[in-house]
Each structure stands twice: as C-alpha cells, then as structure tokens.
Amino acid sequence: MALKTTIAQKLQSHRPVFEKPSIHVDKSDSAFTSSSDSRWSNKDIDPIRRENRKWGVWSLIAYWFSDAFNAATWEFASSMLAIGLSYKDALGITVNGGDVVQVMITAIWPSFAKVPNRIPESEGITTPQMVSFFLFWLIQLPFLYMHPNTLRYLFIVKSILVPICFISILIWAYRSTGGTGGALFDSSFKSTLSGSAYSYAWLSSWTSVIGNFATLSVNMPDFSRYSKASAKWQWMYVPVLPIIFTFISFIGVAATSAGLSHYGTVEWNPAILISHWPNRACQFFAAFSFALAALGVNISANSLSAANDLAALFPAYVNIRRGQLVCAVIAWALVPWKILASAKSFLNFMSAYSVFLGPIAAILVWDFWWVKGGKYDVVALYQPDGIYRYTYGVNFRALLAFLVGVAPNLPGFINSVNPRIDPGVGKRPYTFAWLLGFVITSLVYLVLCLIRRPTETLVERALLPDEVYEAHGRLGEMVEGKESEDEDVKSMEGKAGGKVEESVV
C-alpha cells in the first residue's frame, strides 16, 4: 500500500501543469520598478542580466554577416541597373522569401510552375506565388517563438552557408561569360540616363542604400543588449560593413550582367534569375540559401525590432514572442509582394525608410551624446513620473524636431505611394531624404535644447543596469537573511517552550 502511494505521489509530481491563458504577460520581480509601477515593465524589456548575455564577438559578427548576405543587398545594385544606371554608379552608391520558396518547389516539382493563376493581375501576385509566400510565412513561425539568445545559432549557420552560395554564383557569373562578367561590364555600356534625371536617380538610389544601413543601425540595440562582448568590438563594423555590403552588391551586379548575356533581360531579382538555370539541383540549393537569408533578415531587421517596440508600448500585454507573432499577422495586411513588383517600387520602398529614420537617428545621436553627455539613470526610465517625463510624458523638442525634419520629404513620399499625385519640384528633396531629414532635425533639436535645456533630465553620474542588479541582489540577500534569522528564532522558541530574548552586547 505504501509503495502504491509513493508511486501515485511521484506521478502526481510529474504531471504537466497547464496554466490558464491570460491576456497579461508573465512578470518577474523587477529591479527597475516598484509594485505600483510594475505595469511599465516586463521580463523582455528590462535590461538583460550579465549572466543572461550569451552573444559573444563571433555571434555579433555572424549577425552582421547574416544581415549583409541577403537578397535585399543583392537587389540594391541590380535594381539600379534596371532603372538605367551603370554598374559603376550602382557600386558607387553602395526578398521576398516567398519568391525563392517558389523556385525551390518548382525545382522539385516542375509542374508547380503550371498551376493556373486565380488571383487578379492587379494584386501583383499569382496563385503559385501566394502559396509559396504562405509556406515561407508558416515555416518562419517557430523561429519567431525562439528567444534572441537562441537565435544566434541561426545567424551563425546563415553566415556560413549563404556566403558560400553567393560566392558560387559570382564564380558562375564569370565562368559562364568567359571571364568578362557579361554585357554590363563592357566598356561600351553606359547609363541610359543623363542630366537631372541621372542626378536624381543616383541620389534616390543612394538614399535607398542609406535607408538599409539606417534600419540595421537603429535595430542593432535589439541584439547588442544580449552581448557579453566589450563595446570596443563595435567599432570594427564601421570600416568592415561598407566593404561587405559593396562586395555583395557587386555579386548582384555580376550575376545580373551574366543573366543579361544568357537570357536577354536584366533580372535584378535573384529568384527570377535562378529560375532560368537548367539544373534543378542548383536551382533548389541556391533558392534554399536565399530563403535562409530572408528568414534571418525578417527576424533581425523586422519582426524582433517590431516586437520590442510593441513590448515597450504595451509592457503589460506584449512580450517579444507575442510581438513577433503580431508582426507576422500584420505582414499580410502590408501586401509585401507588391514591393518586388518592379525595381522602381523596390527602391521607392527602401527610400521610404529614410524619411523617418533620418530624423529618428538625429534625435538619438544628439540627445545621448550632446544633451545627456552619454549619462542616463536607467531606473528613472521606468518611472512614469520620473525625470524623463518631460511635459505630460512628451519631449516636445524631439517631437517638433522630428516633424520639421520629416515635412520637406512628405511631398515626394506621397508621390512615391501614389504617382497620380504630382507635387512638382516638391518631390525632389525626397531623393536625398535621409541626409536632409538628419540635418534639419539635428539643427532644430539642437536649437530647441539651447533655448530651453532639459536640465531636469541631466544626471552627474550614469546609473547602469549592472549596478542596479547588484544592489537589488544585495537587498534580496539581506531580506532572505533576515527571514532565515527570524525562522531560527521561532525554531529556538519552539524548542525552548517560550520566547527567546535578544541578547544585548
């Protein structure tokens, strides 16, 4: 009987416990908020503890390699060729995952390419493309559930496999054209644009590239917060990244040039270029590499950054996992397949980033380095009525500077969204949106801070997360020690059958 009871108890202890679903996210004891302010914090938006930072130097290198080796970087230069610039212009300035999934499926089952289209042409996508997009979307869902510390393995794998594919395509481009690189590298090939059209096309393409860099720069803290490497390692990316991005763009140009020589069209989209290859095995493995590249970029540059923003806006209801899943659902409403409808639409989309990221980058840079002198009180960032409340929770200097910086680029931005609206010369500033927005916002923000400096936000010494955690840990030890002491006293009282008096020394 005793044996049966013991077995039953063990089975009971190992029985899985299913918690009742809740709209609120799980909250751990935060070192940065009090019990009354706990709704402003959750485990994912609190600073990462030192022991939970798993990203080393090689993880960060893999992250940047992962972001660089992707279809978008390839398409920057190749799409510039499609709008009339020369390869020298494209290199000097410098995916859709569903497309490459379609190539993979067609490589295995060629009949997939013959599936009849039931979607109107105006939607910018065919039935096979929609099926492929859905499959890619479905495949990436489990990765959206992974913690960023675990995702570093995905980036390491991607940083090994994808460069091998890209370099192999570069070798194909030269070997298949007899070492010349194809028609676009011929000395007789010139830009089809001239005059002001050439200048504005060059500036617009340059802005698209800047938009890509700016996106990665703004998103980098989403991963660097998990880093255990010294901040000095970040400086090596300054000279290295432009070289890597330019090299990948060169591969895109070379492959596009070879494609023009072989197939007679400027195929700026690598998925379409790969689909022309006669070898189905090469089609599949090249498409798989591009799909892996798209998966990594979708997480690092899109879903994770959106998840962090949503968690910061709604910390009581959204954590990183929920935020990424919300982003995945919203992706359908944004009809991303229309971005790749043409080279012009792709560059317009990338330029649109710059309209907003230029002003945002300006505010971040000047506020941290000049206004605050690189010093923040990290605990006060979680206090709704703390020193960073500004005016009713709004930093009017930043808001006004942002609006002034965005305004000159709005006519061009509206025209890129709806070409039927022609603002005339008002669309010209949009061609260098990032630079213009950064400069104007910088000037306005600096002037406003000089007129009325936010002295209430200034601190003599920065209060860093590690200090807060150490102090919180010592406090916890003191509380635990006090509780342990009280329990010892109660135990002694029980044994003595009476109250134990405190000794006075």
Image (spheres, rainbow, N blue to C red):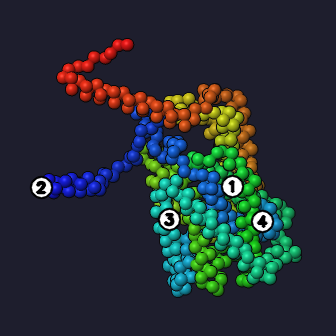
The residue lying toward the viewer, choosing from 135 and 60, is: 60
Give the residue type at disc 3.
Gln
Classed neighbour count for the residue bearing mark 1: other residues with Cα under 10 Å, few (<14), some (14–19), many (≥20): some
Kind of residue sitting beneath label 1: Phe
Distance from the alpha carbon under mark 1 to that under mark 2: 70 Å
Whether 373 is drawn above or below 269: the answer is above
Q: Which mark is residue 140?
A: 3
Residue on which the image places disc 2? 1
Residue closest to the far left = 1
What residue is disc 1 on?
213
Looking at the rendered structure, the number of numbered marks drawn on it comes to 4
Mark closer to the observer (4, 3) = 3
* Residue 370, percent from left and from top: 70, 35
Q: Which residue is mark 4?
A: 90
Cα distance in 3D space between marks 1 and 3: 24 Å
Q: CA distance from mark 3 to mark 2?
A: 52 Å
Identify the mark nearer the N-term, 1 or 4: 4
**Measuring 52% from the left and 53% from the top, which residue is drawn there?**
149
| Image height of 408 relative to 444, above or below | below
In the image, which is nearer the foreground, mark 1 or mark 2? Answer: 2
